[in-house]
Amino acid sequence: MISNKNRTSKVAIIALVFGSLLATTTYSIAAQAAKVKNGVACSKANLKTKVGSKNYVCGKNPYVTPTKLTWMLRECPKTYDLYIESKDQYDIFKDILNSAGPEGKVEADKLLAGISSLETLMKTAVCKKGK
């Protein structure tokens, strides 16, 4: 039969070990979460992680200088590719729309404004350093 003194000691030791384990685990998760955000250096391209509701990927963020591997929101490289493609296609659409007269010019200007808005969104939100 185990005495109350020994039983209390065992419960205290178990509680201490469990509490230490829990505190260490919570600390390491919090420390890792603090390190992963846009613009923070990472070690291997295409690593993926999730912090809270945000998904990050390790890669070369087009808006972080000097160009090196950094954490960025997963949407950043996709959005940047879309932006580059839009810029490349704009000249084709501009020529077509301008040939349609004044109304076409208005539409070409709207298209250019949309491309500019996309770049602003990337610089200030999607790919922003420290976001």
Image: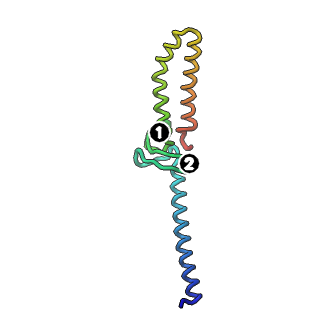
Kind of residue indicated by mark 1: Asn
Task: Check the image and report above or below for 51 versus 119.
Answer: below
Kind of residue indicated by mark 2: Ser
- Residue lying at 55% horizontally and 39% vertically, measured from the top left: 128
- Residue lying at 57% horizontally and 90% vertically, measured from the top left: 3
Q: Residues within 10 Å of mark 1 (few under 14, many from 20)?
A: many
Q: Answer with the quarter of the image where residue 121 lies.
A: top right
Q: Nearer the viewer, residue 43 or 6?
A: 6
Disc 2 secondary structure class:
loop
Q: Label 2 belongs to which residue?
A: 53
Q: Label 1 belongs to which residue?
A: 61
Q: Answer with the quarter of the image where residue 103 lies.
A: top right
Q: Quadrant of the C terminus?
A: top right
Answer left or right for 35 relative to 68: right
Please state the horizontal and vertical placement of residue 17, each as a whole percent of the image: 52, 74
Please state the horizontal and vertical placement of residue 30, each as a whole percent of the image: 55, 57
Answer left or right for 103 relative to 81: right
Task: Check the image and report above or below for 15 versus 96.
Answer: below
Q: Earlier in the sequence, mark 2 or mark 1?
A: 2
Residue depth check, mark 2 versus mark 1: number of the one nearer the observer? 2
Disc 1 secondary structure class:
loop
Please state the horizontal and vertical placement of residue 115, each as a whole percent of the image: 54, 26
- Residue lying at 49% horizontally and 20% vertically, measured from the top left: 90
